[in-house]
Amino acid sequence: MSIEMTSPQQAHRQDRGQEQGQGLGGRTRSGARVIARPMKAATGAQLMRSRGFVTLLLATLLVLAQAIQAMARPESFADLADRFSPAVVNITTSTMVAGREQGSPIVPEGSPFEDFFREFQDRNRGDRAPRRSSALGSGFVISEDGYIVTNNHVIAGADEITIEFFNGTELDAELVGTDEKTDIALLKVTADNALPFVNFGDSDLARVGDWVVAMGNPLGQGFSVSAGIVSARNRALSGTYDDYIQTDAAINRGNSGGPLFNLDGEVIGVNTAILSPNGGSIGIGFSMASNVVKGVVDQLKEFGETRRGWLGVRIQDVTEDMADAMGLETASGALVSDVPEGPAMEAGMQAGDVITSFDGVEVADTRGLVRQVGATQVGKTVRVTVWRDGKTETLKVTLGRREEAEAQAVPAAQPGGEEPVEKDLMGMSLSSITADLAEQLGLDADAKGLVVRDVDEASEAYEKGLRAGDLITEAGQQQVSTISELEERVAEAADAGRKSILLLIRREGEPRFVALPISDQ
């Protein structure tokens, strides 16, 4: 409503307008006319302006949302593939294996079958001769002078290693060093010119949901690219130093050892394993985190081997009831269950101590402590804080070297002193391989591992595709050839707080990883 001064003539016209319903008003004592402007017309205009503004705002937000979505989901990975594929290589390994010795039938001299059996034996004589076995994998160049990273299982036992580059060039590679615990190997080639290479990124910066790109040589089909996202981080399969990035990017046999890139073209993982009931990709792949790989590669390059710190204790996670019983505020840290001879014993550590801090870093659980100790320099003196008898104490421990401690360890004696012929473990009936079994299963004469004799159909092993005739060659990323060795690997995984153990299974020569629970062992 507004107040305006009007003349008598205007007032007269206003009166007539009022009579005609054109407005409302009144007259003051001084003759001034008070006019009430129609609210309806003014409000309608304001609404029109408001609606226009809202429409414009919504349109702007829609455009921004589309722009953000376009930024989050790239239209193509072609530029990244073009730029970094020259540093990704195919790896072919060759191994000489002994032929199978087969018994010859006894044929009486002069028998009508003598010529037939002689011809049969001559035709199959080649099976008994040594033969060459080949395998395929992937890798990537990390320096212009020819250092190449791949998986240990890609080149394990190889007599010859050939590197094929993206442009078709082939070079022989030498083995610099390997680390079975992280399944990493470092190779070296000598080239006439500087080689294209890629750099490691910080895997700790990778977030669940980030885009990733896997490159490699799946199923021996040649170079290929697949894309997906980071499905999870900090996955542990069965190894002591596991720190896997889980991804749904397609990873198949032959991708092993290849790089997992972020969208900046940095390697944040080394493709290592898949979980699958049939050996093919179902969207659950694992890449060893680059921050683990970098440390291993640096040591392999410098020493040709790994040199991990060793504390010398057996530990287990702290549960809620343990924390309550010991007066701890939270169920965290690593409970010391045994202190054999070693650095910790020399420093005065005792069974029942709870390690809450190592070298100034808080200890959350056993897994974190094991990885932190392993990453610490051998010979370094560190401060270790423990919870003992309701109070904290600080010990100074000079770390030993884990590899030396493991080499000097004496395996515990088995009751009776003999390896069991056959035993049931994790829903499978297992036995060590024998010459007869190797021949029956068509395996090489020098094959090593545990033969699956039978599988309980109600077990998880059966659900995950294990069948009679399969050969278990690794457990916890370490080779096994006896039942006692498998039991040791299972015990180590349990001591490290693992809920499952990773097995490497071979069927008709084709390898695949399967994780089986160990809770019932």
Image: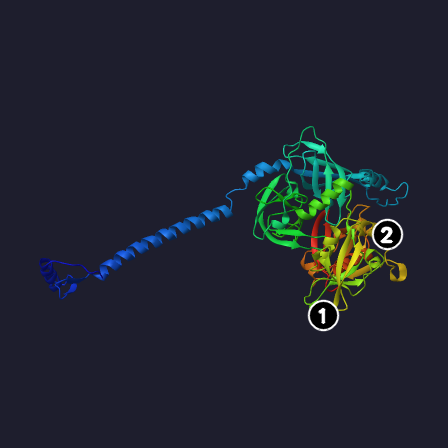
* Residue 357 appears left or right of 431: left
Residue 162 image position (x, y, % from top left): 72, 36
Q: Is residue 154 visible?
A: no
Residue 322 image position (x, y, % from top left): 72, 69
Tag nearer the camera, 2 or 1: 1
Pointer 2 local density, CA inside 10 Å: few below 14, some 14–19, many at least 20:
few
Against 515, is 190 above or below?
above
Residue 156 image position (x, y, % from top left): 76, 44
Asked which quadrant contains residue 108, the reply is top right
Residue 235 image position (x, y, % from top left): 66, 55
Q: Is residue 247 visible?
A: yes
The dot on residue 408 is 2
Q: Which residue is more in the foreground, 303 or 439?
A: 303
The dot on residue 327 is 1
Q: Which residue is more in the foreground, 3 or 221?
A: 3
Secondary structure under badge 1? loop
Residue furthest bottom as drawn:
325
Tell me which residue sits at (49%, 46%) in the image.
Answer: 71
Instruction: Look at label 1 and name its amino acid.
Output: Gly
Pointer 1 local density, CA inside 10 Å: few below 14, some 14–19, many at least 20:
some
Look at the image and tell me in which quarter the C terminus lies.
Answer: bottom right
Asked which quadrant contains residue 320, the reply is bottom right
Q: Which residue is more in the foreground, 348 or 422?
A: 348
Disc 2/disc 1 C-alpha distance (Å): 37 Å
The dot on residue 162 is none
